[in-house]
Amino acid sequence: MRPKIIAGNWKMYKTPTESKDLVEGIKAKLTFPLGAAKVIVCPPFTSLALVQSLVSGSAIALGAQNVYFEDEGAYTGEVSPPMLRSVGCSYVILGHSERRQYFGETNELVNKKARKALASGLIPIVCVGETLEQREKNITDQIVTTQVRSVLKDISSGDVERLIIAYEPVWAIGTGKTATPQQAQDVHLLIRKTIGQMYAWATAEKVVIQYGGSVKPENSRDLLSQADIDGALVGGACLKADSFIAIIENAVLTSRK
Ligand code: PEP
């Protein structure tokens, strides 16, 4: 059975001092058994090493928010997969809509990064999702299918089973608007069917598909109860220990036995 995985995307928030406070707050409240659920925190690059020292030996795993597709070189401002591994990262968010919108990331670039991340032992959390305009034009299915097919290009079935897809409707990110559980479930099933067509249904059934877009304690239980929603990528609500923990509690509650 697929685990429920809750990942917190801290975006460009939290200095090292603030990161320490947040992680210590999360650790202090994470006193219940996670069962099959998993927790990941994705602080900014500047806090990764510090957060690693604080989560080491705990149930919390570490992720980054971006990575480049070369090991080293003259790529000013970029960070490589071995560098992320060296500070204890196991996961990396790729193709977040903010990276697509503000930094011009394309499906092709996200695919290149995902292949490199996998080859380097990192688990990519690959984001897909439609804009409001695309949803209103009724082309959500077409957009998401194209994104999934492009970002998974040339990735083996063994690797696809390890990665995470995050369905994040762009209109729901940071807006307070959430997809209804049924809207989200419909797209999650579409993503799983697309993976099934590309690989095999047995492979598709193993892929963790998270939902992201204004996930909060209040809406997380209904979202996480959907058959094909295997966790959440959380932005705003992960910046406070209380709300992040409440979402984790709902992941544990809704975990399939
Ligand atoms: C995100 O950053 O991936 C996200 C979904 O943000 P928020 O929860 O704030 O909408």
Image: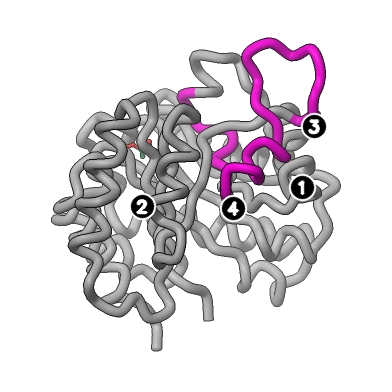
Density class for disc 2 (Cα within 10 Å; few <14, some 14-19, many ≥20) is: few
Q: Distance between the residues labelled 1 and 2?
A: 35 Å
**Circles 4, 2 touching at the beta carbon (< 8 Å):** no
Q: Tell me if residue 235 comes above or below residue 4 in the rendering.
A: above
Name the residue beneath numbered marker 3: 71
Separation of residues labelled 3 and 2 (CA atoms): 39 Å
Residues at marks 4 and 3 touching, judged by CB atoms closer than 8 Å: no
- Mark 3: which amino acid? Asp
Taking 157 as reference, is 19 left or right? Answer: left
Query: Is the residue under label 3 in contact with that under label 1 (CB below 8 Å)?
Result: yes
Q: Position of residue 74 (x, y in %)?
A: 79, 12
Mark nearer the N terminus (4 vs 3): 3
Q: Could you tell me residue 205's position as x and y percent?
A: 61, 73
Q: Which residue corresponds to mark 1? A: 120
Q: Name the residue under label 4.
A: 90
The dot on residue 183 is 2
Q: What element carries label 2?
A: helix
Q: Quadrant of residue 75?
A: top right
